Image (tube, grey):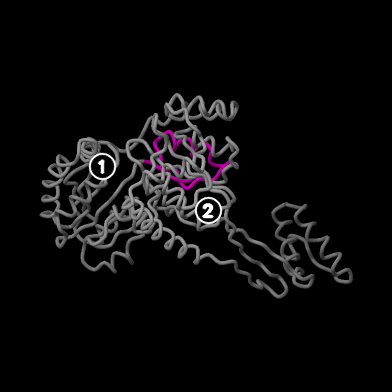
């Protein structure tokens, strides 16, 4: 299918992975060897923070008191939506069992992990929503202990709104520590915390690399790159809304790709004319990121028809996918690769980022081609079990012995043989590989 790039990205999102890896690995090694004291050294170096690492109940109460009532109400609204959606997700996973053959029972159990570590960015922006998304889902999943970890600001500590959000969403401990040292503290069980079984939440390239290195000894939600967003729009779309939505996501970071895929050249050209002015109208702190992302990473792609648009979108497998086109049901049925889908101009990625209820911790860098985002399921282990009567085990034992011998695994075969000999001493079985 023909594609015309009206705007082509000059760069692709990447960092100096080798340099970042070395830096992060050295910090992790230092902290694992040096424990609490070494983690505090890095906190002083990178965060310029010398207060309590684990907030006391009094400090939490004082921080919550600083949050305006209107903001508290908004946080509670978002928390309620996220909680109810997470409860719906949890209801789709059941403990089940079935008699797979007469007398032989197999089953499944969903067991939440014991301890979750939730990383909440707190640098330039206070990621209140990340506290809501990560802590709430862990709570609904049934984790026994939840630590919320966020970088403190010098002389201030963790942003009060983050403290309030983590507290009402169910965090057992709130830790004033950021970066690699925060991730390490949760993983290694420093400061009296239980060792985390899973680490979740967004972060910068150092946090992402720490999670990547630690994956295996601890679970993670995903290895995240720069956030990305794609809009599918036809000629009926509102160019002003399309352009605004693109800019809203470009402000995430200088290397955050945004893509417009359309079958209408006039719409594409109008959007391209509108975007620079919308970026110029942003506050300075947001403007630089959006301008760089649009200049270096954005693409505008013209396709021949909606099937070509859908195929292009599935190939890009965006973190966020918006459809502003006719026949939304067709798109919902057709599209297969995305982290979260936003159907129609009446919703937007910003809703999902902040308050709609679906989770905003999502797969980036085309990982949506094989995985979804953070959910209660990420905090749960789907495990299996089996039991059997002696009669029920007979055909399973016979098949196991023969398959094992064909594979050359005699020890496995004998584990079946010994049961057949014990339970059915008067019977003869042909348990050879060629039987």
Side of 15 relative to 39 (left or right): left
The residue where tag 2 is placed is 379
> How far across and down, in percent of the image, does residue 264 sit?
14, 57
> How far across and down, in percent of the image, does residue 195 sit?
59, 41
Task: Tell whether position 165 is magenta.
Answer: no
Front in this rendered view, residue 105 or 405: 105
Q: Magenta residues?
A: 200-225
Residue under the point 53% across and 30% down: 28
Quadrant location of the N terminus in the rendered image: bottom left
Task: Tell whether position 222 is magenta.
Answer: yes
Front in this rendered view, residue 174 or 233: 174
Front in this rendered view, residue 66 or 405: 66
- N-terminal label among 1 and 2: 1
Q: Residues within 10 Å of mark 1 (few under 14, many from 20)?
A: many
Side of 62 relative to 380 (left or right): left
Quadrant location of the C terminus in the rendered image: bottom right
> How far across and down, in percent of the image, does residue 31 sit?
55, 28
Q: Secondary structure at mark 1?
A: loop
Count of numbered tags: 2
> How far across and down, in percent of the image, does residue 340 sit?
35, 56
Quadrant of residue 419 within the rendered picture: bottom right
The residue where tag 1 is placed is 251
Q: Secondary structure at mark 2?
A: helix
Which label is found at residue 396?
Answer: none
**Residue at the extreme right:** 426
The CA span between labels 1 and 2 is 30 Å
Residue under the point 45% across and 42% down: 119
């Amino acid at each position: 299918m023909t594609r015309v790039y009206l705007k082509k990205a000059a760069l692709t999102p990447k960092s100096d992975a080798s340099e970042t890896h070395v830096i992060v690995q050295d910090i992790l090694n230092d902290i694992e060897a040096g424990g609490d004291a070494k983690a505090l050294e890095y906190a002083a170096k990178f965060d310029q923070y010398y207060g309590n690492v684990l907030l006391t109940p009094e400090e939490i109460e004082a921080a919550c008191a600083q949050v305006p009532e209107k903001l508290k109400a908004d946080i509670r609204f978002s928390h309620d939506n996220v909680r109810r959606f997470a409860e719906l997700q949890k209801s789709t996973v059941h403990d089940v069992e079935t008699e797979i053959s007469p007398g032989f029972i197999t089953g499944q159990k969903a067991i939440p992990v014991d301890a979750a570590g939730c990383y909440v960015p707190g640098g330039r922006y206070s990621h209140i929503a990340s506290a809501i998304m990560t802590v709430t889902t862990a709570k609904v999943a049934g984790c026994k202990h939840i630590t919320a970890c966020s970088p403190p600001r010098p002389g201030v500590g963790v942003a009060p709104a983050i403290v309030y959000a983590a507290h009402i969403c169910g965090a057992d401990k709130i830790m004033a520590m950021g970066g690699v040292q925060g991730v390490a503290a949760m993983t290694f069980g420093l400061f009296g915390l239980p060792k985390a079984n899973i680490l979740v939440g967004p972060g910068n390239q150092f946090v992402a690399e720490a999670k990547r290195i630690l994956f295996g000894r601890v679970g993670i939600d995903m290895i995240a790159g720069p956030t990305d967003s794609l809009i599918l729009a036809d000629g009926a779309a509102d160019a002003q809304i399309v352009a605004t939505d693109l800019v809203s996501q470009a402000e995430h970071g200088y290397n955050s790709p945004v893509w417009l895929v359309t079958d209408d050249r006039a719409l594409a050209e109008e959007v391209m004319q509108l975007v620079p002015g919308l970026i110029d109208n942003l506050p300075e702190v947001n403007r630089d990121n959006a301008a760089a992302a649009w200049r270096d990473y954005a693409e505008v792609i013209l396709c021949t028809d909606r099937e070509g648009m859908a195929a292009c979108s599935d190939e890009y497998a965006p973190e966020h996918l918006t459809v502003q086109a006719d026949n939304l049901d067709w798109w919902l049925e057709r599209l297969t690769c995305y982290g979260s889908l936003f159907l129609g101009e009446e919703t937007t990625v910003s809703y999902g980022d902040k308050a709609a209820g679906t989770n905003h911790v999502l797969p980036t860098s085309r990982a949506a081609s094989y995985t979804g985002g953070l959910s209660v399921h990420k905090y749960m282990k789907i495990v299996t079990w089996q039991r059997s009567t002696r009669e029920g085990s007979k055909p399973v034992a016979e098949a196991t012995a023969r398959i094992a011998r064909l594979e050359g695994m005699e020890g496995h075969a004998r584990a079946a043989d010994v049961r057949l000999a014990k339970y059915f001493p008067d019977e003869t079985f042909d348990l050879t590989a060629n039987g």
